[in-house]
Amino acid sequence: MVKIKVELFGPLNSPHGKKFIKEIGRNISIEEFMEKELQYQKSAIAFFVYLVNGKRVDKNTILKTGNDLQIFHPIGGG
């Protein structure tokens, strides 16, 4: 299982600072994960910063490492 740690700061009409951990038993793209789990916020998603062990990496690196993934979304994206 892959644990994905997600921290969201979404639009004003959504919960701020939402944090959750999602376990996935198969390979899944970040885009697919976000679309399925956070479809109601999709229009606010501008970009993501991926951090693994405190270092910024791209999604391909994350998917290869299998480490916990942290996704950060800024307020007011669009």
Image: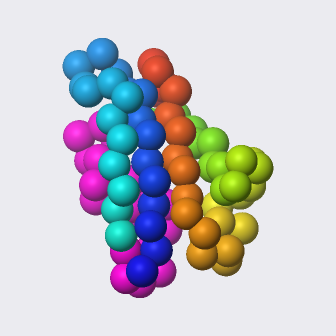
The structure's colour scheme is rainbow
| Residue 58 x, y percent position in the rendering | 71, 57
Q: Position of residue 60 (x, y in %)?
A: 68, 68
Q: Is residue 13 left or right of residue 56?
A: left
Point out the stretch of residues depicted in magenta. 24-43
The correct choice, above or below, for 70 with respect to 9 in the image is: below
Q: Is residue 8 magenta?
A: no
Residue at 50% from the left image edge and 34% from the top image edge: 73
Q: Is residue 43 visible?
A: no
Image position, residue 70 (x, y; %) = 54, 50
Q: Quadrant of residue 40?
A: top left
Q: Residue at x 37, y 74 (%)?
A: 24
Relative to 13, residue 55 above or below: below
Which residue ends up furthest to the bottom in the rendered image? 26
Q: Is residue 38 left or right of residue 31?
A: left
Asked whether residue 68 is in view, the answer is yes
How many numbered discs sit on the rendered protein? 0
Q: Quadrant of residue 10?
A: top left
Asked which quadrant contains residue 44, the reply is: top left
Which quadrant would the N terminus be assigned to in this image? bottom left
Q: Of residues 3 and 11, which is closer to you in this image?
A: 3
**Which residue is most to the front?**
53
**Residue 26 drawn in magenta:** yes
Q: Main secondary structure of the magenta part?
A: helix
35 above or below 40?
below
Identify which residue is drawn at 67% across, 77% down.
64
Between 39 and 21, the residue placed more toward the observer is 21
Kindly identify the residue that appears in the image at 36 percent across and 56 percent down. 21
Rendered location of residue 27, percent (x, y)? 47, 80
